[in-house]
Image (spheres, rainbow, N blue to C red):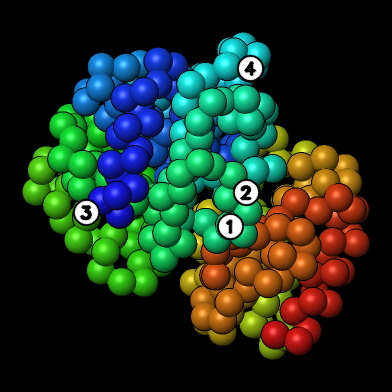
Amino acid sequence: MQEKIHDFIEKIRAAKSIAVMAHKNPDGDALCCVLAMARLIELNFGKRCICVYDGNIPAYLDNIPMRGRACYVEHIDTNEVFDLAILMDYGARHQIGAPLRIAERAATTVEIDHHRNDAPMSDLCINDDNAAATGVILFDIMRGAGWRYDADVLDLLAVAILTDTGNFKFARDGAPLARMAWLVDAGVNIRHLMESMNNKPRKAVQVEARAAANAEFFYHGRLALAVIERRDYRNMDGRGELVLNLLAQIRGVEYIVLLKQQKENQIGMSIRSRGKAIDHIAAAFGGGGHMRAAGAVVCDSLENVRRRVVEIFKGE
Ligand SMILES: [Mn+2]
């Protein structure tokens, strides 16, 4: 790790222009890591980074520090060649969206990620698929490098860890809690951060509540399947964590699948498991992710995808 940090610092020092990015439609971990990375580079190297994203940033992240620094990709010139592109929490190259062009053209790339990735694309990879959040890895880089930080950096790292661990529900070891303990001792106020994220539009919460209320159950209630149709999809804020969380609270439910009709024949799929691995199921649909939280985008009709999901869980 120390060797990689050293290498990373050399690359930052050598760069005059730096772009930082994550996966499309960034979640808390993705967006907060991008912004925290940019702030850390400003504080420690005096260099201003461009923070670029594609897709939508959910409203529950509107109040995080430095939110205004995130630039929508269509508002910047992707023909500009950067000395260094830093890819945070990106998963796989096709998940970056339009900023991929910047990453591909940059002289040097560094990636910091906790997604399982068989095809990393960078000159330097500080990846750990056992980390609960990319925020945990960035925390360790910050501490390992002895970098200066400020209250914004600490809040951003805390939101990254809180959101990606489902407020620690998905923590597999003490690592994210140990980092959070340090952050709280350094001044982070968890209650304040949680409250700042209670910022979803009313319609978004209602759409998710309705999807949970209309969920179907299969295989003696072990599989819960919820659907958000096209007309409701545009009112969503984020990926539908509320639906997934509600259904996961039901006794006997082991697997939760949420289908989102993004376009007429394009279905976003989120899969959660309370026990066994389900990432192979996401992979079967051309997606990926983590062992118990994965997803895919499938180009097929809603009815076909629904049928295929029910079918594939027959053997689970
Ligand atoms: Mn993440």
Callout 1 environment at 10 Å: few (<14), some (14 to 19), or many (20+)? some
Write down the quadrant of residue 194 in the picture.
Answer: top left
Q: Which residue is mark 4?
A: 78
Q: Is residue 151 above or below residue 69?
A: below
Q: Which residue is mark 3?
A: 180
User: Is 316 situated left or right of 149 in this image?
Assistant: right
Q: CA distance from mark 1 to mark 3?
A: 26 Å
Q: Which mark is residue 117?
A: 1
Q: CA distance from mark 2 to mark 1?
A: 6 Å
Is the N terminus in the top left, top right, bottom left or bottom right quadrant? bottom left
Q: Which residue is mark 2?
A: 92
User: Is 307 situated left or right of 63 in this image?
Assistant: right
Q: Amino acid at mark 3?
A: Met
Callout 3 environment at 10 Å: few (<14), some (14 to 19), or many (20+)? many
Q: Amino acid at mark 1?
A: Asn
Q: Amino acid at mark 4?
A: Thr
